[in-house]
Image (cartoon, coloured by chain):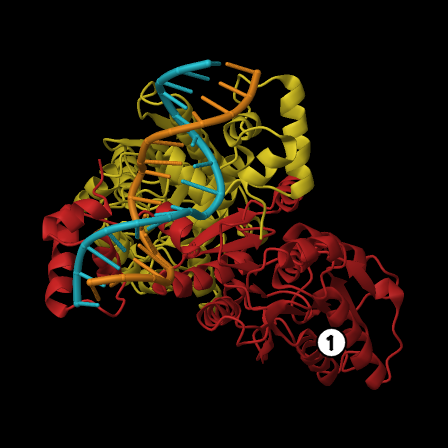
Chain colours: A yellow, B red, C cyan, D orange
Amino acid sequence: MAASINDVAQAVGVSASTVSRALRGKAGVSDDVRSRIVEAAADLGYVASRSASSLAGGRTFTVGVIAPYVGRWFFGTVLDAAEDVLSAAGYDLLLYNLGPREARKRFFAELPVRKRVDALLSLLIPDEAEGLALRSLGVPLATTVGAPRPGFTVVGIDDRAGAQAAVRHLVNLGHRRIGMIAGASGPLHWTAPVERRRAYLDVLAEAGIACDPALEVDGDYTVQGGQRAMTQLLAVPNPPTAVFAQSDEMAMGALRALRLHRLKVPEDISVVGFDDHELSEVVGLTTIAQPVAEQGAEAARLLLNQLDEPGAVRPGHVTMPIRLVLRDTTAPPRNGR
Amino acid sequence: MAASINDVAQAVGVSASTVSRALRGKAGVSDDVRSRIVEAAADLGYVASRSASSLAGGRTFTVGVIAPYVGRWFFGTVLDAAEDVLSAAGYDLLLYNLGPREARKRFFAELPVRKRVDALLSLLIPDEAEGLALRSLGVPLATTVGAPRPGFTVVGIDDRAGAQAAVRHLVNLGHRRIGMIAGASGPLHWTAPVERRRAYLDVLAEAGIACDPALEVDGDYTVQGGQRAMTQLLAVPNPPTAVFAQSDEMAMGALRALRLHRLKVPEDISVVGFDDHELSEVVGLTTIAQPVAEQGAEAARLLLNQLDEPGAVRPGHVTMPIRLVLRDTTAPPRNGR
DNA sequence: CTGTTAGCGCTTTCAG
DNA sequence: CTGAAAGCGCTAACAG
């Protein structure tokens, strides 16, 4: 059986309370006693039972993370970075994959994190009821997606500015027929598609380009969807000379569709993506880069802050920088204009 | 304050034990009482405190997962699938990212999962000492990587057979100068690179092709590394007409290098990868597909089995099928032979 | 079928 | 600076 706090206490000849204080670095233990306790604990291979500490102390030293996917690059990268920060601070990370519809339903119905986590990081956008449920947990909340919302610390990017930069880049190259592969039908309450679309419309307007609804197609945030969307765009009577894809994954699907249609990129058509996916460099995709890992790390850090100074820090809003990364998929349109 | 078991007990007018039994579906509670308890619990929004249950019952209903990366496709996909299976069974998943050297050291020094998990899934290959530490936890252990090892249930693929299929494919197309981008310097104790290399050598031998050490280059399991390796292979006096990359990520790096060198794939040179990464289809990469998500799900399932029938099931070894997926990066060598 | 009685292994007052 | 006592909220025998 694993050693308990009493075993250590006995070995050193002190009380359990002293061992507890000593091992957690609390004041009020003489250096001599403390070092003897630390040594004995190491000898016995003693580690405090998290269940017991949580029960007695009220803190779990665990942060919950809920995500709509784990395998996808964006989420995996955020998760990875958040874990680094949390574990360095002595916190464990409880992961919930709420992608499957029933998993999500079950999670919000039972709220299994209740009494299990000290804070929660959401990688998905909760709807009204879900948001309420999360706030009812009474723990600090953070998210790396979506618009600022009450009760949440949000770390994000300026989607509008990013999308504007992407579309402006195409306009500056001389394109007038600019299509968009959107991500509208993605997860509910996602604000990115809305913001990015508005930016697209704004830039067209400011450039004096009439927008054509036929040039806006849904790509579902997936490679497959992007491919389908591009195929659809090519079937339009007067197809675009350039396309803004709201995510790199959709952009890659578009590139695939173009290859299958024997169209050359960027000679025949330009493509710009959004995200700077790890493989975008490989395919030479021009895109808007956002600091994904940094967003995860920062969100985790802000959560830890709130844990350290309870009440002191209000949930805030951090905007991380984006930038246009020029690679090989954009160029001026074929016939000058 | 959140409702406790006593609040529910009081509301229904029964004892806490009865509530406990009723809510966990234990036998020995009349249907009438049980339904009233369930109702009251729902009303009060009661959820049992995991800390308290663990402490009292000895089980944590938590499975730990240790991984060398989370953001990379392979690991994220395994994790995703494992989480689905575990959460459906009522288990939570505690994630540890042991990529950073110090994180790994700290983990094995403190073994924070001790008394915290009922089972553990390793996505990395522990060395001798680490393996011992894990076994000392006294919980079921599973892994999706590496060779069979005592104490672990391993779910994997036949690396040798997969690599053989890849190289044989190139040989059958008529290639005689076949290079390999290996993953030798990856994580320690990784068996895949070794097995895949042996397969490469075996197939060359069986085809009567002398192997040339200059044609074996390390690609570090990364896109960057693959690109570097391919560049190096092109600099060899008599460069290969085909390349076997031990992972799709390295293969993609190779494709990028070839594009930069203005070489056509597969006309000038053939490339075959290994894994069937989610984006391999996008770039049209011919590769060896392995069921990644299924490995994660299966490992989780086997862990649950062992949890259900303690002692009954011995740790075993499951091999999942692989298959050659033909796409657009392989063809016969240019000049017939 | 249900209630009572003990803890699980810690942390936390409160004394000394 | 240290110890004793009292739970944290639940589960697990053991009685009835």
Where is residue B242 drawn, in percent x and y? 74, 71
Residue under mark 1: which chain is it in? B
Is A294 in front, or is A219?
Answer: A294
Asked if residue B156 is positioned above or below residue B121 in the image, the reply reads below
Is A279 in front, or is B231?
Answer: A279
Quadrant of the rendered structure where residue B325 is?
A: bottom right
Is B54 in front, or is A68?
Answer: B54
Q: Amino acid at mark 1?
A: Arg
> Is residue A230 shown to the viewer in this render?
no
What is the secondary structure assignment of the residue under circle 1? loop
In the image, is B279 to the left or to the right of A179?
right
Where is residue B269 drawn, in percent x and y? 71, 69
In the image, is B257 to the left or to the right of A231?
right
Quadrant of the rendered structure where residue A194 is?
A: top left
Where is residue A143 drawn, in percent x and y? 35, 38
> Circle 1 sits on which residue?
B334
| Residue shown at 75% from the left, 81% from the top | B171
What is the quadrant of the N terminus of chain B in the image?
A: top left
> Is residue B144 shown to the viewer in this render?
yes
In the image, is A154 to the left or to the right of B65?
left
